């Protein structure tokens, strides 16, 4: 098993075929493993994959089985025509009555059936036929053998779709995949194809699957390039019927159904079938084939069958006699988690402090490390909110010399109904000219250090971009060396800013005159909210603001 980079962008090129294949194959393998691990937890599961018998598929072929099926249908048709001839029924008359029947068919109530409803029934029948063409050949092993089938078919793309595309040799492709994994119930199928927040944030197991973006991105590309809908058929072991649906996804992250989720009979006990169409440059052998081969080697507990656009069938039969063990929950490292997953963890956290949250949810985060992380975060937030945390007070970072200078501190005061002194945030305005002059002297140094700090950070970002474009290992090492120097400069600037804050703290600590207490202040609530927001270390994870 492996974890790959999420493939969200689908651009024209040979790798686009691989992106489609990788996205849905990885999800299919996850579904199969999820099903098996769930069944293995039961005392006596009758539907788990046994894997104790050797699998022989040397002479097996989906394509040959499909040909035999068509041949059988052709013979049945000939037999039908012979019988009709014996009874004196003309073929032309029969054909006409068959094609006209859906439009004129009457129900028991005597009302003519709705044409749109009959068209839906015909479309459902076509979907079932396409699906069964793929899976009927494996009907004997479909519920006992973990299996994934991928088929890509190629056809000429309508000129209407390719007229504005600059690429040459653009073709239309039909992508189909089936897996007999856990499947989806009707309620889950309604969510399928929409961009969803990650469901793996709380338990980051070793799975290949995406963060909820891959499949919807593929669906968007498919319908945007061909204008054709997405088809999905799925069934869980708990449901008697499978669910079929045909839909478009919209820019509002909603679904527009051509076929609403409907019950149909299913030839498999559990699993999912997906079909979609997309445009891309002409298929060249080697790209998908390499991916399928590597995936099969890494997942020898699953049979993988791939049929390419030219009708070549490659079967990688299961070789292992046991499934890999279910991965255990692994705490992520702070540097490896994305902002979306982090927000999910934060909002669902029941920890009383951010420090406890970091220690509990991330690997290699001790109490000391958590304190360092919070200290750095608070320093950055202070600059962003223009409010500095000093040892004995809070001070606003002013931009204009004409603005009033405010500083805030907690003092023991008797207020409210209590007769005992309690901490209360007191807001002061500086009045002394001498004090104001000293403030601006210190704060100017702080602002200059902040600008230098930001310039160094921008240089580091540029160097990181250069690494991505670097052509040789020597060039990469040279850039990394420059980054290390800049990181040392960053650390020096942090210390400079801390020393300047000490100066500012001493200024407000020692001076007792030259400022007045503001008892009646219209925007007092804003000051109080700012003091709370700037102190990340005292906040509860679930209460963290966007800025925090």
Image (cartoon, helix red, strand yellow):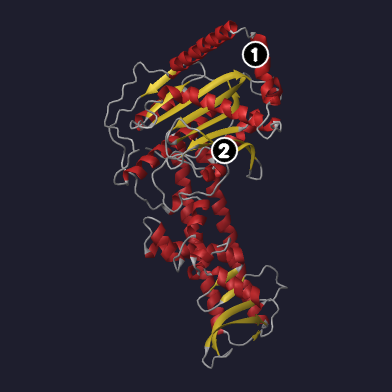
Nearest the eye: 25 or 269: 269
Would you identify the image quadrant in which residue 215 lies? Answer: top right
Q: Residue at x 53, y 93 (%)?
A: 419
The residue indicated by pointer 2 is 262
From the image, state whether disc 2 or disc 1 is nearer to you.
1
Element type at mark 2: strand
* The disc label shown at residue 368, or none: none
Q: CA distance from mark 2 to mark 1?
A: 31 Å
Few, some or many residues within 10 Å of mark 2 (<14, 14–19, 20+): some
Few, some or many residues within 10 Å of mark 1 (<14, 14–19, 20+): few
Q: Is residue 311 left or right of residue 35?
A: right
Q: Is residue 144 left or right of residue 270?
A: left
Nearest the eye: 204 or 372: 204
Would you identify the image quadrant in which residue 270 lies? Answer: top left
Query: Residue 152 appears at what percent x and percent y?
Result: 52, 23
User: Marks 2 and 1: CB-CB under 8 Å?
Assistant: no
Q: Residue at x 59, y 79 (%)?
A: 408
Nearest the eye: 34 or 358: 34
The residue indicated by pointer 1 is 94
């Amino acid at each position: 098993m492996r974890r790959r980079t999420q493939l969200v962008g689908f651009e024209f090129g040979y790798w686009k075929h691989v992106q489609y294949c990788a996205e849905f194959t990885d999800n299919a393998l996850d579904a199969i493993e999820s099903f098996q691990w769930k069944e293995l937890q039961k005392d006596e599961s009758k539907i788990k994959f046994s894997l104790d018998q050797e699998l022989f598929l040397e002479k097996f072929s989906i394509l040959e089985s499909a040909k035999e099926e068509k041949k059988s249908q052709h013979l049945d048709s000939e037999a039908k025509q012979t019988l009709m001839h014996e009874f004196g029924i003309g073929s032309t008359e029969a054909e006409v009555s068959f094609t006209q029947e859906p439009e004129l068919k009457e129900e028991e109530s005597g009302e003519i059936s709705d044409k749109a409803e009959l068209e839906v029934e015909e479309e459902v029948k076509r979907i079932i036929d396409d699906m069964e063409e793929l899976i009927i050949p494996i009907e004997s092993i479909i519920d006992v053998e973990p299996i994934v089938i991928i088929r890509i078919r190629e056809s000429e793309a309508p000129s209407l779709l390719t007229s504005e595309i600059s690429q040459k040799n653009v073709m239309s492709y039909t992508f189909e995949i089936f897996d007999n994994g856990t499947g989806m119930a009707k309620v889950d199928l309604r969510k399928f194809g929409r961009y969803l927040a990650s469901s793996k944030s709380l338990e980051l197991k070793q799975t290949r699957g995406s963060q909820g973006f891959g499949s919807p991105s593929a669906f968007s590309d498919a319908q945007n390039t061909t204008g054709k809908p997405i088809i999905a058929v799925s069934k869980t072991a708990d449901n008697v019927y499978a669910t079929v649906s045909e839909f478009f996804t919209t820019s509002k992250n909603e679904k527009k159904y051509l076929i609403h989720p409907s019950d149909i009979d299913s030839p498999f006990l559990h699993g999912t079938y997906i079909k979609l169409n997309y445009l891309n440059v002409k298929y060249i052998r080697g790209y998908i084939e390499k991916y399928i081969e590597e995936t099969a080697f890494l997942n020898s507990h699953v049979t993988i069958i791939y049929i390419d656009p030219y009708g070549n069938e490659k079967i990688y039969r299961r070789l292992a006699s046991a499934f890999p063990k279910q991965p255990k929950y692994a705490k992520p490292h702070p540097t490896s988690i994305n902002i979306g997953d982090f927000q999910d963890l934060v909002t669902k956290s029941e920890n009383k402090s951010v420090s406890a949250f970091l220690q509990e949810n991330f690997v290699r985060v001790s109490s000391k490390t958590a304190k360092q992380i919070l200290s750095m975060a608070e320093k950055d937030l202070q600059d962003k909110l223009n409010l500095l945390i000093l040892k004995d007070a809070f001070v606003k970072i002013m931009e204009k010399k004409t603005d009033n200078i405010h500083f805030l501190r907690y003092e023991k005061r008797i207020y409210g109904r209590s007769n005992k002194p309690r901490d209360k945030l007191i807001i002061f305005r500086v009045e002394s000219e001498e004090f104001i002059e000293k403030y601006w002297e210190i704060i100017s140094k702080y602002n200059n250090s902040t600008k230098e700090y930001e310039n160094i950070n921008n240089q580091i970002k540029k160097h990181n971009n250069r690494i991505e474009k670097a052509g040789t290992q020597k060039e990469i090492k040279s850039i990394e060396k420059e980054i290390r120097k800049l990181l040392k400069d960053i650390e020096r600037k942090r210390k400079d800013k801390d020393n300047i804050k000490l100066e500012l703290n001493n200024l407000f600590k020692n001076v007792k005159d030259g400022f007045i207490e503001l008892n009646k202040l219209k925007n007092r609530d804003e000051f109080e909210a700012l003091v709370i927001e700037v102190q990340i270390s005292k906040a509860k994870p679930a209460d963290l603001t966007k800025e925090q």
